[in-house]
Image (cartoon, grey):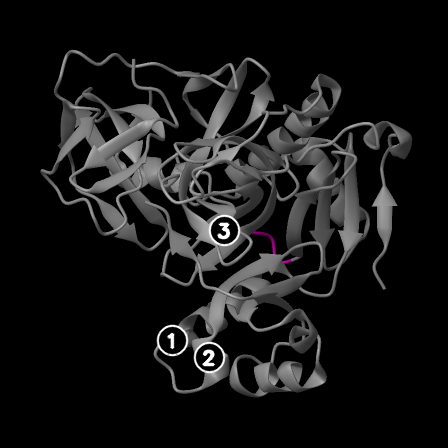
Amino acid sequence: MRKLLSVFLAIAMLIMTCFVLNVTAVASEDDSKITTVPIALPAELQALENQANEKYNKLLQVWAYAPELIDDANANFPSFYGGAYINAEKKLVIQVTSLDESVIEYFENIIGLTNVIFDEVKYSYAELKQAHADIVNKMDATSTDPIIANIAGVGISYKDNAVALYLITSDSDAKSSSIKNEVQEKVSTFDSIKIIATSAKDTPTAVVEPGTTIKNGAYSRSVGFWAEDEDGNLGIVTAPHSSISEGDTISIGTRTFGVAATPYFSGSVDAVFIEKTNTYFTATRYVSGWDFSLVSNAYTSLAVGSTTYSKGKSSGCQTGEVIDTNYTTSYGISNCVVTSAPCASGDSGGIVAGSGTSSSRYVAGIVTGKQGTTDYVIYVKAGNIISTLGISVY
């Protein structure tokens, strides 16, 4: 049984029922587009979420292998750490495999205990990660075994203290004992696997402002954020998938914008820096529709339960909630984040931001694709992009 230790009294749930955090998508005449009215988190809830994410990022800094890279999937995690997420009351829930005074004191000395809850769980994050990695290694779309071939993605569900296995099957089959037995036999013997049904695999979705449209040849995608490379050259970041090569010319409308540097579409990164070569274009941190600006020379890692603010050329401005921060896609990109925001073809490369205020938010990453049939946003993390490309947020 899990034990919950609340350090401070919970905020009244009545307050929470007054707010709707997610946005319902409505199809427009163009099926690739989604229209919506952007909804920001109320200021008082945003302040609580900011505090929770600040504590979360502080822990990641303490555990980081390298101080310049905050990575919530690769760090020197304590052996008793089971994960963390932000709950509906915007408190930081820290999961541990043993809950005693020494563990409480450990966290108190790093982040304090205001608005922190402890949750005692069975499996450590290290154990969940190992089980996750074992399944990823078995993913094979060409397998003759239907169970293996139909693995659509793998993540970690902190709230369930389980590995999340996305399987192409029906909801009823996903809950059946026969499927669970087959997964145990063919995929993993780990005894905490949450099978999530899907009917399709993930799909990469292919003044200059974050979320607007750029093109290379017949391909179009969205702008993520402005950045500077190590030589101080200005440019934009987007998701190349496999359709942008080094030296490609990138256009906005009928004008040439710039030239692609080395693209990355492997490991935990789907990103490329496009150096601006045309003086016609001007850099901006402003994101219209959301009416906020991106914080310069900074980024954030968002815990599960955090609110995201995304923008792509097809979906426009969308609010979502972080669902998974350890997701591996069916097309091979790992250490991604899944949010409940809707995504459409062409949103790839679009900005995902979080924390901050209604007028100023932090870069969290860029869209790489949409998840199965939910069409949820999958994004690659800003920290991995920045360290791999050798850039900084403008």
The outermost residue toward the left is 247
In the image, is 313 to the left or to the right of 21? left
Magenta region: which residues?
Answer: 75-79
Residue that badge 2 annotates: 148
Magenta span: predominant SS is: loop
- For marks 3 and 1, the one nearer the N-term is 3
Q: Nearer the viewer, mark 3 or mark 2?
A: 2
Which residue is nearer to you in this view: 17 or 184? 17
Residue that badge 3 annotates: 73
Q: Which mark is residue 140?
A: 1
Pointers 1 and 2 in contact (C-beta within 8 Å): yes
- Badge 3: how crowded within 10 Å, few (<14), some, or many (20+)? some
Q: Is residue 283 above or below residue 109?
A: above
Q: Which mark is residue 93?
A: none
**Residue beneath the point at 34% across and 39% down:** 385
Q: Amino acid at mark 2?
A: Ile
What element does badge 3 sit on? loop
Q: Position of residue 134 (x, y in %)?
A: 48, 73
Q: Amino acid at mark 3?
A: Ala
Q: Is residue 267 magenta?
A: no
**Residue beneath the point at 59% across and 16% down:** 358
Q: Nearer the viewer, mark 3 or mark 1?
A: 1
